[in-house]
Image: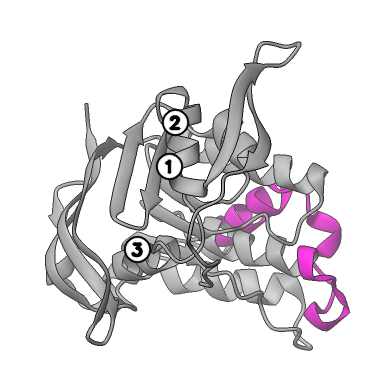
Amino acid sequence: MTEGLAVSGLTAGYGARHVFDRLTIPAIEGGKLVALIGPNAVGKSTLLKALIGIRPVHEGSISLFGEELTALAVSDRARRIGYLPQTLPQATTLVAYELVLSAARAMATGSETREAVEERIDRVFDELDIRELALRRMGEMSGGQRQMVGLAQVLVREPRLLLLDEPTSALDLRWQLRVLETVRTTVSATGALCLLAVHDLNLALRFADRVILLGSGGLLAAGEPTDVLTPDLIEEAYGVSARVESCSLGFPIVLADRAVHRNTEPGSR
């Protein structure tokens, strides 16, 4: 196994408030799509921000393909990591191609020709099936279209680690499937790694190679999707009674039956 990402004893949060303390996640090999799941306010977004370096890490170790990330400057981490936040790209007067070209040039090596950069951009637009957006102004696009352009900016940089924070939140069903199919194919082909925060448990079951489940006390479980998304763990994490059954094609699906009463309040990210 080629170890891609290992998180050990990580403590991070907002100022003096720790969102998680001494969080350890079993090592994940490269070439995997990993779904990061859990209810609101358990630290999914905070973990992604800690990995990229925009949220301070108070203690702990983050290793990416054998390299300690906490020892690197944020700018150096950015060369290895592609991060797509929940916030949609701005509705500017720039066209999509200009934004993706800027992202590609930021990571281009001195030996990479202009033609090679353009081929890389064309490939990403084709993989995401958004070529028709290339010359559209961002201000003329829907939220979902801007989300797709944001993902193109991440993919064109060819990072070793992709951190995607709810990348399907503004997308309809077709584009949700397109995004997850493209990301899974990309990491499998390149040996990179993707950590994807998502609320849809059925998308996690369908596309993820591994699942990390966070709860209010930190890590609840990590491993194969069907080992993590069990009725007991779903109830513990989300406070719902649920079943995991197979559809007519044999894929597992989560069916939530009812909320389980408990004395908690809904959180916010």
Which residue is at 43% across, 42% downward?
236
**Residue 170 rendering spot, x and y as whole percentages:** 74, 62
- Which of 23/128 is in front? 23
Please state the horizontal and vertical placement of residue 267, each as a whole percent of the image: 52, 69
Label 2, on which residue?
232
Residue 137 in which image quadrant = bottom right
Q: Is residue 267 above or below residue 162?
A: below
State the residue position of label 1.
236
**What amino acid is at disc 3?**
Leu
Whether residue 59 sits left or right of residue 99 in the image: it is: left
Residue span colored magenta: 116-144
- Quarter residue 20 falls in: bottom left
Alpha-carbon span between mark 3 and mark 2: 24 Å
Q: Secondary structure at mark 3?
A: helix
Quick one: label 1, few (<14), some, or many (20+) residues within 10 Å?
A: some
**Residue 52: x and y, percent?**
34, 68
Q: CA distance from mark 1 to mark 2?
A: 6 Å
Q: Secondary structure at mark 2?
A: helix
Identify the mark at residue 47; answer none if there is no mark: 3
